[in-house]
C-alpha cells in the first residue's frame, strides 16, 4: 500500500496543495478529518474533493482535534490517502429512525466474503452509535470495526459526517476494506482509575441514565463528588465518568452529552439496569506510563499505517501532554486520526462504543516476514527520560495515594459489612445457620424441586431429655452437648445441605434434591454417630446423649415449605412418643 497523510492549515491551502489525481476509486481509502466544523466549511471541502477527482469515494468527519504524525493539531483539514495493492473498498452512507436497523443494513450491504475491516464515522450527537454497531454485530460480529463519533469544539451543538454524496448530522458513513491478505489489528488504551464504591445502575433506557443505587444520577454526582461537579453536569462528568468493567475485563467509560430537565443524562454508549459502575478519573501520569510500555506491542505487527481514534475528553484532560501518548506512534508507522465524541473498538468478536479511550486500527498488506526487516525493535525505543520525569511528579504520587486511601477504606467497609451479614445469619453458640437464615433460603425450595423434578427432604432433630442434662451437669455442659451435636450434624452432611439451629435443643436440616431414602440414610447415620459419641468434659465427665428425628419430603401437593416442616415436626413428636432415640418418617 502507499500511504499519504497530509494536513492543511486552511481551505485555500487544502485547495492548492491536495493532489487526488491518479487515485483509483476501487482501491483508495480516503479519510478526511476536519477541524473546521461549520457546515459551510464542510461544503467547501466536499466540493473541492469532488472537483479534484469526481470519481473518488471518501468518508469525512468533523473533529474535536486532528491527529497527524504523532501530534495533536487543531482547526486543520487532515487527509489520509491509502492506495491499496490487494484490497478494494466499498463506501456507503446509512441513516434511519432505528439505529439498530441502520447497523443491520450496513452489514447486509457492505460486508462481503473477504471483508477484513470497516471504518465508521457516526454523527456525535444525534444517532445512537452504540445501537448502530450492535446492529452490525447482530449480523456479523467477526469483522473488526473501527472509527468514531464525529466531534466539534466542545459546544455539544452540531457534528457532521460527510462523503462524496452529502453532508449529514445524523447516521453513519462507512467504508469496508475487502482483501484476501490484509492484516488488521485493533487496540485500545484507557487507564482511567476507578475510585469510590461499586454502584448498580437501577434505572436506564439505552443511552439515557436516570438512577444508580436508586438515587437520581445528578444527585449521586453531587453526593459523592460535590456540588461543583453535580451542578456542572454534563460537562463536569468528562473528568469523572462512570467506569464499567465488562465480563471479559474490558473497561468502558461512560460520559454524557446532555442533561434533561428531570436531571437524567444522555450517555454516549448504552448502559443497562444491573450494570456495575464506579466513578473514575483520568490519571495523566498513569496514561503516559502505560502508553509507553504498551506501544511495543504495535511494532510486532509491523503495520504500514495506524489510524488513531482518540477521545476529545482525553485530549482535554491531558492538554499538551497528549503528544507524549501520540509521539511514540511515529516509531511504528505513519499515523493519522482524530479526536472523537466516542470510539468504536472491536476485539474477540465483540464491538464496543467507548469514551475517554485511545483506539487504534493498524493495517498491513505485506507478508509478515518481509516487513520484519522494515521495522526493527530498536526503532521503538522511547524517550525514556521524559516519561520518567512524569513518574517522579509529586502530583502523580499524591493522586495515587489518595485513590488508594479511598479504595482501601471502601474495601474495609465492604469486608466489615460482609462479616456482619455473615454473623446475622449464624447462631452464636454453635455457629450453625439460624432460623431466620433457614427461612430465607428454604423459601423457594418447593418451587425449585418441582421445576427440577427432584424431591427434597427435611430432617427435624431434638435432643432427648436435654433438660435432665442441664439439671444434672449444669448449663455449661448442656452448651457443650449442643456444640458437639452441631459438629456431628455438620460433618455428616454435604456442603449444599443447610444445617440450622432452630432454637433451644432443636435442629433442622434441609437436604436439597435428596429423596426420602437418602434422607433416611443420613438420619440413621446421625442417630448412630450421636449414640456412640458421648461428650467428654475436661476428661472427667462423660455425658452420653441421644436424639429423636422426624423426616419429611416435599410432596406434589405441598405449596410452601412450612407444610413440610409441619410434617417433619409431627414425625419428631411421634418419635418422642414412641420412646425417643429413633427415626419416624412423616406422612
Ligand atoms: P424431650 O426429650 O421431650 O425433648 O425432653 P427435653 O428435656 O429435651 O425437652 P424440654 O423442651 O423439656 O427441655 C429443653 C431444655 O433445653 C430446656 C432449656 O432450658 C434447654 N435449653 C434451651 N436452650 C439452651 C441453651 O442454649 N443451652 C442450654 N444449656 N440449654 C438450653
Ligand atoms: Mg425440644
Ligand atoms: Mg428435647
Image (spheres, rainbow, N blue to C red):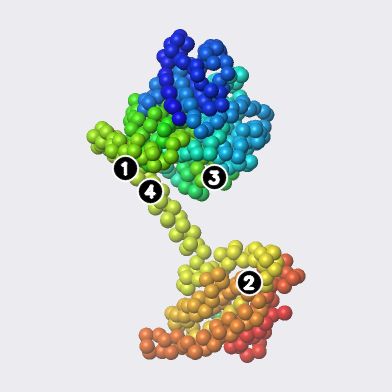
Between circles 1 and 2, the one closer to the viewer is: 2
Real-space Cα separation, disc 3 to disc 4, in angstroms: 38 Å
Between circles 2 and 3, the one closer to the viewer is: 3
Say if 88 sits above or below 214 in the image. Answer: above
Q: Name the residue under label 4.
A: 409
- Crowding at dot 1, Cα within 10 Å, few <14 / some 14-19 / many 20+, comes out as few
Question: Of residues 535 and 374, which is closer to you in this image?
Answer: 374
The earlier-in-sequence mark between 1 and 3 is 3
Q: Residue at x 42, y 56 (%)?
A: 416
Real-space Cα separation, disc 4 to disc 2, in angstroms: 42 Å
Is the C terminus in the top left, top right, bottom left or bottom right quadrant?
bottom right
Residue 567, position as x, y percentages in the image: 69, 76
Circle number at residue 513: 2
Q: Residue at x 49, y 77 (%)?
A: 491
Q: Name the residue under label 1.
A: 401
Between circles 4 and 2, the one closer to the viewer is: 2
Q: Mark 3 points at which residue?
A: 349
Question: Of residues 448 and 482, which is closer to you in this image?
Answer: 448
Element type where label 4 sits in the image = helix
Amino acid at each position: 500500500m502507499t500511504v499519504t497523510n497530509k494536513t492543511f492549515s486552511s481551505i485555500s491551502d487544502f485547495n492548492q496543495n491536495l493532489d487526488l489525481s491518479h487515485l483509483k476509486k476501487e482501491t483508495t481509502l480516503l479519510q478526511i478529518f476536519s477541524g473546521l466544523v461549520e457546515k459551510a466549511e464542510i461544503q467547501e471541502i466536499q466540493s473541492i474533493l469532488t472537483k479534484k477527482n469526481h470519481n473518488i469515494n471518501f468518508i469525512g468527519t468533523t473533529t474535536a482535534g486532528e491527529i497527524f504524525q504523532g501530534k495533536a493539531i487543531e482547526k486543520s483539514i487532515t487527509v489520509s490517502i491509502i492506495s491499496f495493492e490487494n484490497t478494494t473498498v466499498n463506501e456507503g452512507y446509512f441513516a434511519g429512525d432505528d439505529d439498530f436497523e441502520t447497523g443491520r443494513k450496513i452489514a447486509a450491504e457492505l460486508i462481503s466474503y473477504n471483508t477484513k475491516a470497516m471504518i465508521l464515522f457516526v454523527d456525535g450527537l444525534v444517532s445512537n452509535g452504540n445501537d448502530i454497531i450492535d446492529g452490525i454485530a447482530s449480523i456479523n460480529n467477526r469483522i473488526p470495526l473501527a472509527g468514531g463519533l464525529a466531534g466539534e469544539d466542545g459546544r455539544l451543538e452540531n457534528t457532521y459526517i460527510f462523503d462524496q454524496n452529502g453532508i449529514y448530522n445524523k447516521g453513519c458513513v462507512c467504508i469496508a476494506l475487502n482483501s484476501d491478505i490484509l492484516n488488521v489489528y485493533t487496540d485500545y488504551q484507557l487507564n482511567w482509575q476507578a475510585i469510590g464504591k461499586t454502584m448498580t445502575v437501577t434505572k436506564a433506557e439505552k443511552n439515557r441514565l436516570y438512577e444508580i443505587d436508586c438515587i437520581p444520577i445528578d444527585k449521586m454526582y453531587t453526593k459523592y463528588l460535590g456540588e461543583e461537579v453535580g451542578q456542572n453536569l454534563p460537562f463536569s462528568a468528562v473528568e469523572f465518568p462512570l467506569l464499567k468493567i465488562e465480563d471479559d475485563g474490558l473497561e468502558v467509560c461512560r460520559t454524557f452529552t446532555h442533561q434533561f430537565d428531570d436531571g437524567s443524562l444522555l450517555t454516549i454508549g448504552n448502559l443497562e439496569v444491573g450494570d456495575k459502575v464506579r466513578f473514575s478519573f483520568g490519571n495523566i501520569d498513569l496514561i503516559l506510563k502505560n502508553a509507553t510500555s504498551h506501544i511495543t506491542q504495535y511494532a510486532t505487527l509491523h503495520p504500514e499505517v495506524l489510524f488513531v481514534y482518540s477521545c476529545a475528553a482525553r485530549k482535554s484532560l491531558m492538554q499538551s501532554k497528549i503528544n507524549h501518548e501520540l509521539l511514540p506512534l511515529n516509531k511504528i508507522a505513519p499515523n493519522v486520526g482524530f479526536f472523537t465524541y466516542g470510539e468504536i473498538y472491536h476485539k474477540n468478536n465483540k464491538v464496543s462504543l467507548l469514551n475517554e479511550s485511545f483506539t487504534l486500527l493498524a493495517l498491513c498488506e505485506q507478508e509478515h516476514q518481509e516487513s520484519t526487516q522494515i521495522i526493527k525493535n530498536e526503532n521503538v525505543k522511547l524517550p525514556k527520560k521524559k516519561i520518567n520525569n512524569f513518574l517522579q511528579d509529586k502530583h502523580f504520587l499524591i493522586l495515587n495515594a489518595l485513590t488508594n486511601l479511598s479504595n482501601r477504606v471502601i474495601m474495609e467497609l465492604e469486608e466489615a459489612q460482609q462479616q456482619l451479614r455473615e454473623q446475622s445469619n449464624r447462631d452464636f453458640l454453635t455457629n450453625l445457620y439460624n432460623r431466620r437464615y433457614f427461612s430465607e433460603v428454604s423459601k423457594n425450595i418447593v418451587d425449585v424441586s418441582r421445576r427440577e423434578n427432584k424431591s427434597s427432604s427435611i430432617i427435624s432433630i431434638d435432643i432427648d431429655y436435654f433438660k435432665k442434662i442441664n439439671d444434672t451437669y449444669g448449663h455449661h455442659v448442656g452448651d457443650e452437648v449442643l456444640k458437639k451435636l452441631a459438629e456431628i450434624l455438620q460433618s455428616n452432611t454435604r456442603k449444599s445441605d443447610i444445617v440450622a439451629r432452630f432454637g433451644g435443643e432443636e435442629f433442622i436440616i434441609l437436604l436439597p434434591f435428596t429423596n426420602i431414602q437418602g434422607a433416611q440414610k443420613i438420619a440413621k447415620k446421625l442417630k448412630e454417630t450421636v449414640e456412640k459419641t458421648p461428650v467428654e468434659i475436661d476428661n472427667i465427665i462423660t455425658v452420653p446423649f441421644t436424639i429423636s428425628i422426624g423426616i419429611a419430603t416435599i410432596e406434589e401437593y405441598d405449596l410452601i415449605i412450612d407444610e413440610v416442616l409441619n410434617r417433619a415436626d409431627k414425625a419428631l413428636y411421634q418419635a418422642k412418643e414412641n420412646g425417643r432415640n429413633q427415626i419416624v418418617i412423616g406422612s
